[in-house]
Amino acid sequence: MLKDVRTRIDLSLNRVTKVYPGVIALQNVDMSIRGGEVVGLIGENGAGKSTLMKVLGGVIVPDGGAIVIDGVQLPALTPAEAAKQGIAFVHQELNPFTNLDVAANVLLGREKTSGPFRLLDRAGMSRDVEPILRRLGTRFGPDDSVAALSLADQQLLEIARALSMAARLVIFDEPTASLTLAETQTLLEVIRQLKAEGVAILFITHRLTEIEAVADRVVVLRDGRNAGALARHEIDRDRMVRMMIGRDAGQFFEKHDHAAREPLLEIKGLTTTAYPDARVDLTVRAGEILGLAGLVGAGRTEVARAVFGVDRRLAGQVMLDGAPLPDTVAGVISAGLCLVPENRKEEGLFLDFSFAENISLPSLARMARAGFVDRRGETGLAEHARHNFSIKAPVLTRAVAELSGGNQQKVVLAKWLAMDPKMMIVDEPTRGIDIGAKAEVYRVMQSLAGNGVGILMISSDMEEVIGVSDRVAVMCRGEVAGILGPNEVTEEAILHLAVG
């Protein structure tokens, strides 16, 4: 456990290079980290952060350069060697074993056994995992089923797994993407504790305020190369943004004035299976971005799923452009409403399909000629999406699974925009997307609203909600607690309504 942490690590990467066909992922990258310090690693999607992380984890072998650990130079690591060196990971993409309980997931591969037949010691495993969960302030216990955990709880499970190892270096990859504000603060405190114990922390995130809160140094990557570094006293949001993308932070929230139009989506008395005793009343106007805020578990995603026809509507009425909205997904899409889901990997993409195939999937009826897909039309549609969203995919036939998380999110958005929808519900549209890509998403959303499309934007990013929305509706315990007009939207006002 954490009390068994070994000697402090001293690690450096010297001129590390990795090249894929058509893409230079890393080129002569240098970085160092030592025990007892927190290094923030930032950059746009495709800048090389994930590749660098995989080099440290032994998942990929670099084409050049060296890894130096405690004075010993190595051309590469294997996963086993990385673990032996005390390198642990908290991944952004969650892949728990949902058929197992929490303790089994945390201690996977390091299970405790007892007796002559070496049977699993479940009670002993629970005892070992309990203090780790308590340290993280989780709402679940070691014997709980992982299948019942929310996305936020699964993220905390991933963190608990890393903390269960005698790690000398913990690499956090977007660890707060699914966490509430309180859970994020708990995690940042855990990072400070690990630092005090001599553990090195490599903190990869797009949330720059978190970098400001805990990082001792910042390393910036751009297009696979070192773009610069910042010492503790130099770290601030504007400097980090300029180094990442060469623009000032103030350019990202360019809110446009949208003329008030007629109601487009009208939700009256909607009751969901998650909150059968609550009623939701909400109106989104044509050409408006309505932000939907609230704490995790407030019922925002459940409303989106019920409106889209994924989940059953227990009661109430949903109208789109004056007509009743069907209660099936196919009917809703045909009516002109699209949903960008919160979980892109499980609900928004076919990961084994190509970039072009994912883009054209909702538009197959238009793409078909005599029962066959018009490949030329599909290619044109995908090329248009790649250009409009600046999606970094060297070839259109590349599987979406091979793209970065941010580029995958852009593909989800782009495929629905190809349908020319009247109304869009976007659930956490910029989760896991770098600050430059966020600007592109905001630009597209503002353009859609300017053309009369209604947008219901669910977001846990307070800065995003305030900076992008024309109005903000706030949910609490399955109901809309209040709606804030353009001159009423502040962080304090949103939180006041969110906590009831």
Image (cartoon, helix red, strand yellow):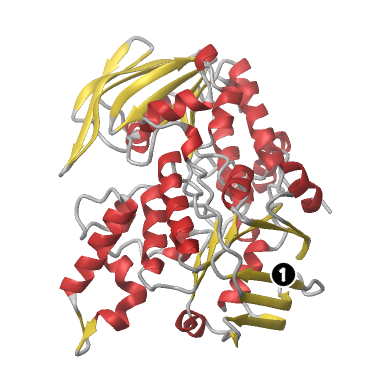
Closer to the camera in the image, 302 or 16 = 302
Count of all numbered marks drawn on residues in the image: 1
Quadrant of res 76 = top left
**What's the residue at 45%, 63% (across, down)?**
448
**What's the residue at 69%, 37% (across, down)?**
136
* Position above or below: 325 against 170: below
* Position above or below: 447 against 49: below
* Position above or below: 139 against 213: below
Closer to the camera in the image, 286 or 358 = 286
On the image, the x and y values in percent for residue 333 come to 47, 79
Closer to the camera in the image, 494 or 193 = 494
- Neighbours of disc 1 within 10 Å: few (<14), some (14-19), many (20+): some
Mark 1 lies on residue: 274
Q: Horizontally, is 255 left or right of 3 in the view?
A: left
In the image, what residue type sits under mark 1?
Ala
Q: Horizontally, is 48 left or right of 336 in the view?
A: left
| Residue 205 appears anywhere in the view | no
On the image, the x and y values in percent for residue 148 come to 65, 60
